[in-house]
Image (cartoon, grey):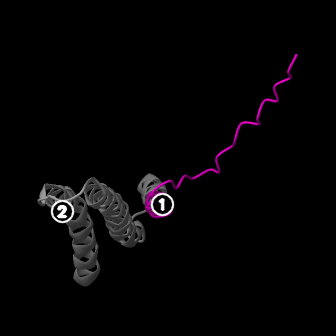
Amino acid sequence: GLSTALDAALGVLTGLAVLALTPVAQIWILQRPQPLTTDDLLAADHAVRAASVRMLAAVATAMGLLNLTGALAVCARHVAGPLDVLCDLAVLGTLLGALVAWLVRKPGATLWPRRLRPEVERVRL
């Protein structure tokens, strides 16, 4: 009914709002004045800013996609035929996107473990 449609619409709007406002928050973080102190403190400030921007992007993306997932799941219950399959695929896609965004939120995080090259042994002649 109307309540279900309203919930789905609010989920979509909330998800889109989170995704749209994230760059604004990131710019605000990056435009804050940096301390005029030693090189060490400046490097630490840079590292905190970089980690904050990355974390904000990942968490906001995951939150926005989860809101869209919920809205699409509600919509999927009310359609039939080919649209049902399309909605189910969209739900799966947004859910996987949210999971990926959450998994790579920390610096150095990857989806697959890094393979280290085996050290080449040098033979001295």
Write down the quadrant of residue 54 in the picture: bottom left
* Dominant SS type (magenta): loop
In the rendered image, residue 123 lying in the magenta stretch gets the answer yes
Q: Nearer the viewer, residue 37 or 114?
A: 37
Q: What amino acid is labelled 2 in the image? A: Ala
Q: Which residue is mark 2?
A: 25
Please report the residue visible at 16 percent of the width from the left and 61 percent of the height from the top. 35
Mark 2 Cα shell of 10 Å, populated few (<14), some (14-19), many (≥20): some
Q: Earlier in the sequence, mark 1 or mark 2?
A: 2
Q: Nearer the viewer, residue 68 or 41?
A: 41
Q: What amino acid is labelled 1 in the image? A: Asp
Give the foreground label among 1 and 2. Answer: 2
Q: Which residue is mark 1?
A: 88
- Label pair 1/2, CB-CB below 8 angstroms: no
Classify mark 1: helix, strand or loop. Answer: helix
- Total marks drawn? 2
Where residue 16 sits in the image (x, y, percent)? 23, 62
Q: Which mark is residue 53?
A: none
In the rendered image, residue 115 lying in the magenta stretch gets the answer yes
Where residue 112 sits in the image (x, y, percent)? 62, 50
Where residue 26 sits in the image (x, y, percent)? 21, 58
* Residue at mark 1 to residue at mark 2: CA–CA distance: 32 Å
Write down the quadrant of residue 80 in the picture: bottom left
Q: Nearer the viewer, residue 44 or 99?
A: 44
> Relative to 100, is 19 on the left or the right?
left
Please report the residue visible at 13 percent of the width from the left and 60 percent of the height from the top. 32
Where residue 2 sits in the image (x, y, percent)? 22, 80
Which quadrant would the C terminus be assigned to in this image? top right
> Relative to 56, is 24 on the left or the right?
left
> Relative to 87, is 37 on the left or the right?
left
Q: Residue lying farthest bottom? A: 3
Instruction: Give the extent of the magenta segment.
Output: 96-125
